[in-house]
Image (cartoon, helix red, strand yellow):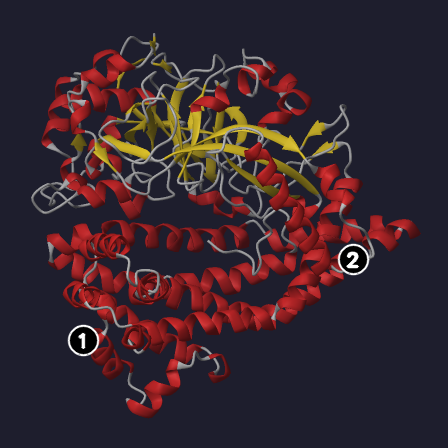
Amino acid sequence: MIKKFLAVFIVFTLILNTNVKADGDDEGMWLPMLVQKLNMQKMQAMGLKLTAEDIYSVNKSSLKDAVIALDHGSCTGELVSPDGLFLTNHHCGYDEIQTHSTVEHDYLTEGFWAMSRNEELPNPGKTVSFLISVEDVTAKVNEVVNNEMSEKEREAAIHKLAEQLQQDAVKNSKEWYEARVQSFFEGNNYYLFVYETFKDIRLVGAPPSSIGKYGADTDNWMWPRHTGDFSMFRIYCAPDGKPAEYSEENVPFHPKKYLPVSIKGVDMNDFAMVMGYPGSTTRYMTSNEVTQEMNNTNEIRIKLRGIKQEIMKKEMDASDKVRIQYASKYSRSTNYYKYSIGQNKGLKALNVVDKKQKAENELIAWINKKDNRKNKYGEALPLIEEAVKNIDESNIVQNYWIEGFWLGPEIIKASLRGFYGLQKTVGNEEAIKEFREGGKVFFKDFYKPIDKDIFIAMCNTYKNDIKPEYYPSFFALVDSAYDGSFSKYADYVYSTSVFVNEDKLNAFLDKPDMEALQNDPGVIIANSVYGFYMDLQAKTEESMYDYNKGKRKYLAAILEKDENIAHYPDANSTMRFTYGSVGNYSPADAVLYKHYTTLKGYMEKENKNAPKNDEFYVHQKLKDLYNSKDYGDYAHKNADGTKEMRICFTTNNDITGGNSGSPVINGNGELIGIAFDGNWEAMSGDIAFETELQKCINVDIRFVLFVIDKYAGAKHLIKEMKIVK
């Protein structure tokens, strides 16, 4: 999800007084290395029994060593065994489950369980990263910048230093480590992060979608929820313990730390901490930016994804093969389609723009009280406002470009990557072989009729909604040679391009012809679309430098104005923790949602006589377990002596995308659940956290164990874990 024109790729740390107070009772995505300074006193008062070093330490094993970033921060996972077994969400493993699925072996519908380690399935390209260390490099960055620099010069100097710091960090530790300098508070502070990344990640288990994705799009972002959203993988490494690509010689990885798993259960007001890698929040948006986000990003995403999803769904409903091919693509599209609908609704209902304007007016009044403040910060908000105004039209075009072209028909990315990738294969048989294998993977989940229809629909929508001055160059070709008909043009493109036909691609690889490649219609479209985007970026460059300068000064003013409040930085895929408690909430007048759901409610949602791929299909085996109340050690014991199988629970932890799969940890440092969603009433949360409404939806770890043990019969996986009763 792209929320700004230009991302800042450098880092920070927060220099705070020791007498600061937390910013809100439940709000905050806090940096683990600052836990002792900012959070320990309140957390321990709420029920935490751990020390700061138990949470984050570079000298001994700590919770940070049991929490992993999947695919460099797209999701989070947690180690639960000494042999590299980890849990994450079902939707975080959905790509891998789908990739291994066929009509004959439909793991999406039936689930998958490796009953021995030999049956665990490799996943090329999937990675797991451990945070090794964090260093405050703010002072080093401040040494290479000064107030006389232009914003462009400033960014260049920081980028140069960041590259050197990253190189030095790897050179001075282990050569396979990765280092990243990242910016916080819009370039006011900086940190250097060092990671170790493993590349042999194997699928161990996944429940059927009727459990792992129960409720699917209807229940997505909603509470009450009855979804067993989990999957299991294992990390493998070389025999010497180092990261390595997949090999039969690799062995299970032995982590520094893994989480004990508690089956004691959770109740109202129990302490709950979530650790993970939240991807992106924009809590420091100005009112103008929020308006632009609502009107441009969200509305365009809703419109274009709605069109694409309708095309996909029609073909998926007509064929099991196509359903499996497009299951993950469709799910990715619908997730933030619904998110955008909910976010706009929440931002309006909670009057976020008005609240932002009020806060900005208060900041302006504070700035204007002293001349030195006016000199330092007086231009901040005007710079942002003017930049947002200047890029508004380009921002609309960019969002159409993203949804219509970059996230539209797959021919565009496939052709662009193919064009540049094939140039490296000339005379290189090994490279050609790898390209063939890559093509095989791509075409396994590619259905030309869907892609062609999406291409036509996106081009027509773009042409109808966007001014001609913003058309990519291939539109002129369609007008002159195809009577302006994208349908006629698509007939030619999809019957000619080597990037939509595996046989044609392989025939081309038999006799590569680079001149012919340049004239491939897919390549012509891809270069036209990409070249247009680069030109668009160049046109807004100066406005973006002004915007970045304004945001940096705006955040600096906020931090100085509220120096006794511990502000947390926006999420940026770095490790964070958030603490809170189990609890219910009231979404509307006279409505109270309790803090947990049960298998009884799951059965009540069943769509009886539905096909297996229905959102609310219930497998007969699960019905049998429910009817016999065969819950094993995983049932919740009520005060009156009755037992029930709980599925999900809510806490007030502050999470966002990237936190999917994060461990929910009790006061003893034990795993009690897996975070997987937020609630509909607080979809504005990435921009404005609402203390009374915002909830984190978690699958109860007891339901996870129940499914593994009782439903799947994979008791060997239970035996790997340290179960705490």
Give the residue at the far front of this rendering: 427
501 and 24: which is toward the camera: 501
- State whether residue 45 is above or below residue 27: above
| Residue type, mark 2 in image | Met
- State whether residue 521 is above or below residue 95: below
Label 2 packing within 10 angstroms: few (<14), some (14-19), many (20+) = few
* Secondary structure of the residue carrying numbered label 2: loop
Q: Using the rendered view, name the quadrant where residue 597 is placed.
A: top left
| Residue type, mark 1 in image | Ser
Labelled disc at residue 495: 1
Where does label 2 land, which residue?
Answer: 149
Q: Position of residue 493 (x, y in %)?
A: 24, 77
Point 72% across, 54% down: residue: 154
Q: In this view, does 521 lie to the left or right of 322?
A: right
Is tag 1's residue or tag 2's residue first in the polypeptide sequence?
2
Point 60% across, 17% down: residue: 52
Q: Where is residue 560 in the image (x, y as percent from the top left)?
A: 79, 41
Label 1 packing within 10 angstroms: few (<14), some (14-19), many (20+) = few
* Secondary structure of the residue carrying numbered label 1: helix
Q: Is residue 504 left or right of residue 519?
A: left
Q: In this view, does 487 lie to the left or right of 265?
A: left
- State whether residue 16 is above or below residue 186: above
Labelled disc at residue 386: none
